[in-house]
Image (spheres, helix red, strand yellow):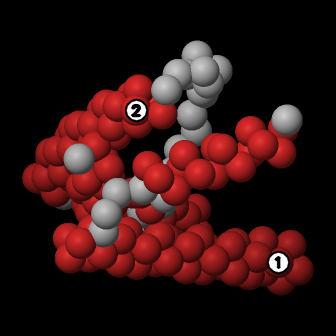
Amino acid sequence: QNVQLARDLCNDRRSARPAKGAFGRGLEWACKLAAIAGALVFVGLVLMSIVSISGRKLLSMPVPGDVEMLQLCAAFASSSFFAWCHLNHGDVKVDFFTEHLAARYVHALDAFGSLLVGGFGALIAWRTAAGAAALQATGETTMILGVPVWVGQALMVPGFLLLALAGAYRAV
């Protein structure tokens, strides 16, 4: 029974997958590229942390501004994964209440959820961009490296815009 349930779930997910078309393929490519960029940034941050921690412990020479770079870059990298996850059904879903519903109702609820995700992505992109603009106006920089703080926040905006587009696309 569990094997059959797993097969049904996989079949439902495959049938719920929207037709691609030119826009869908472009969106999928952009989301995949953003996720790869985020992954590469995280790998770079891990390597920098290893070098910094080793240098701190062994030679008393950490990487200057390592924590600042970690904060600025991790925010961008994190925001770059959301759209790819949503586009590929990678969201956390609790289907306890919809388990026994007909597939068309589940798909309608999924579309509504995607619409909410798209709206949330647009809202967060807007507010993140507004926050970056406010930070740019103040001229605030990081303490050690002197990097403008608004840059790290502005780098999150494309990831949230992609999330908004992915949500709208999946809703349709």
- Residue 22 in the figure: left or right of residue 46: left
- Residue 11 in the figure: left or right of residue 160: right
Amino acid on which disc 2 is placed: Arg
Reading the chain from its start, which is encountered first: label 1 or label 2? 1
Q: Which one is in front, 145 or 84?
A: 84
Element under disc 2? helix
Q: Give how far apart the Cα atoms at labels 1 and 2 are.
A: 55 Å
Mark 2: few, some, or many residues within 10 Å (few <14, many ≥20)?
few
Residue 54, percent from left and from top: 82, 78
Q: Which residue position is annotated with label 2?
A: 104
Q: Residue furthest top?
A: 97
In this view, the mark in front (1 or 2): 2
Q: Which numbered tag is attached to residue 54?
A: 1
Q: Is residue 127 above or below residue 106?
A: below
At a point 40% along the width and 32% down the height, the residue shown is 104
Q: Check the picture and name the quadrant holding the N terminus.
A: top right
Q: Is residue 70 above or below residue 41?
A: above
Q: How many marks?
A: 2
Residue 19, percent from left and from top: 31, 63
Q: Quadrant of residue 162?
A: bottom left
Residue 103, percent from left and from top: 48, 33
Element under disc 1? helix
At a point 44% along the width and 49% down the height, the residue shown is 16
Residue 50, percent from left and from top: 76, 76
Amino acid on which disc 1 is placed: Ser
Q: Which one is in front, 139 or 71?
A: 71
Q: Which numbered tag is attached to residue 18?
A: none
Q: Is residue 40 above or below residue 66?
A: below
Q: Is residue 22 visible?
A: yes
Q: Which one is in front, 32 or 73?
A: 32
